[in-house]
Image (spheres, rainbow, N blue to C red):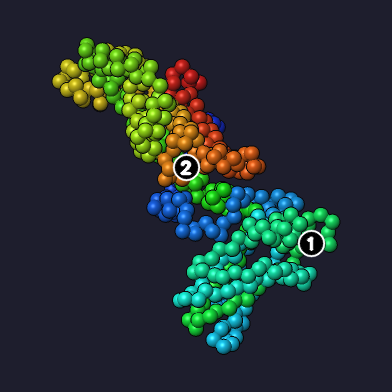
Amino acid sequence: MSWLRQQFKQLLRHPSAVAGLVVIGGLLCLAIYAVLAIPYSEAIRLWRGGEGIWDDSPRNALPAWVNFWPGVNLPETIIVNAGSAAGKSEDTGGVKAVKVALPFDYQYDDFPSEVTIFFEAKFDQRRPQVSLLWLTPDNREIALGERGLSARERYSVSLDQRLTARFGGQTPEVGLFADPAAGEATVLKGRYELVANVLLFEEASDIDAKLVVYGKVSGVAGTDDRRRDLWLALLWGTPVALAFGLLAAAGSIFTTLIIAAIGVWYGRWVDAVIQRITELNAILPALPILILIGTFYSRSIWVMLGVIILLGIFSLGIKSYRAIFLQVRDLPYIEAARAYGAGNRRIIFRYMVPRIVPVLVPQFVLLIPSLVFLEAALAILGLGDPVLPTWGKVLNDAFQSGALYKGYYHTVLMPAFFLMLTGFGFAMLGYALDRIFNPRLRTE
């Protein structure tokens, strides 16, 4: 313990180590929070979407903190709910007329991205009929048309081509909020109201309405083209990336270290077989093998992790460790251990391997970000786990949807920032550890 405290104090003398520890500590805290706040099954369910999970979320929205920039006042999503059979109603000859009013204030400098109305109707045989009216702050009334309602009805106002024609080619979300007195498309701020006049033809019939005026900013990290909150993927991508990097690095490096020690200690044909396998593995292209496995067998992140560990066990690092172990094998304390009858296993695991573990630590730390980038690269190539929300999956989805060409840069910059932050943190820490444990780089 005293040795560890001494090494930690020496580590804190390096500013790069402090910066790296702060970054890695922040990522670990984020990973722990992600696992505790959003259970694994819930994260998978949310990322897959479906069942109306993201119906109230805007598409390709920027992060909400963009509005903190001076002069920026982009719209946020406005949701107006009406209770079951809300509003005024009157019964005439068995037909019940219900008036549902959905008012809201709009004080933003830009137009919304979409406008959608959701209906839930309860009826037996005869479908309710609804007539929609849009009221503007300057007392104009815009008829949105009439329609029969099914049990679940979604009326996307923004996709109504009849309204586009009535607004002279302007999209409905612009025409409904534009100031007609202005020379160019300018938002008319004030109180708007959607009025739904509903006819219910059965006594037990009922209706619920919800108006969603989609904004252009949402959440901490914005949304993607499937309306999913990117913060979910960035948050859960942290434990996935760190776990993948740590497990792959630990599994490959420590197994390689033990195999090198076994080869040196037993020598002869054991060492020869290990060296030949290492040389054969060195010429195998790792990335094409991973691509083949992901294409023809499985894209599971755990399968990829296992293959990476297997390919990394007999890496060229065995030859470096072998050179060190050849020197360690002839040290006096090894000869003393053999003299008092220590077994082969005890000598390997108790006296040889711990001898070079300090030299191994910087390599272990520096290997983690490269494996994190490898997992992200596989995801970008379309070979990532189709279930897990990861940073690489966000980049792949952004590429597939043409986000950069459409100007949705946040869908690329946000995961790229986390990848660069991870690489920066482990690189700074590994650089400092190398200066501490590498005798050729020590300054003290």
Q: Mark 2 points at which residue?
A: 390
Q: Which residue is drawn at 40% across and 51% down?
A: 40
Q: Which residue is drawn at 35% across and 34% down?
A: 297
Residue 135 place in picture, x, y as percent: 72, 70
Residue 217 place in picture, x, y as percent: 63, 53
Is residue 232 visible to the viewer in this orientation of the structure?
A: yes
The amino acid sitting under disc 2 is Thr
Q: In which quarter of the image is residue 416?
A: top right
> Which of labels 1 and 2 is toward the front?
1
Q: How crowded is mark 1: few (under 14 residues within 10 Å), some or many (20 or more)?
A: some
Is residue 10 visible to the viewer in this orientation of the structure?
A: no
In the depicted structure, whether residue 50 falls above or below residue 322 = below
Give left or right: position of 393 versus 258: right
The amino acid sitting under disc 1 is Asp
Give left or right: position of 123 versus 307: right
Residue 427 place in picture, x, y as percent: 50, 30
Q: Residue at x 75, y 64 (%)?
A: 189
Label 1 vs label 2: CA separation? Answer: 43 Å
Q: Residues within 10 Å of mark 2 (few under 14, many from 20)?
A: many
- The quarter of the picture where the N terminus appears is top left
Number of marks in picture: 2
- Residue closest to the eye, 96 or 76: 96
Q: Residue at x 67, y 67 (%)?
A: 144
Give left or right: position of 271 versus 150: left
Residue 341 place in picture, x, y as percent: 15, 20
Give left or right: position of 416 versus 184: left
**Label 1: which secondary element:** loop
Specify which label sits upstream in the sequence, 1 or 2: 1
**Label 2: which secondary element:** loop
Q: Name the residue under label 1.
A: 179
Q: Quadrant of residue 211?
A: bottom right
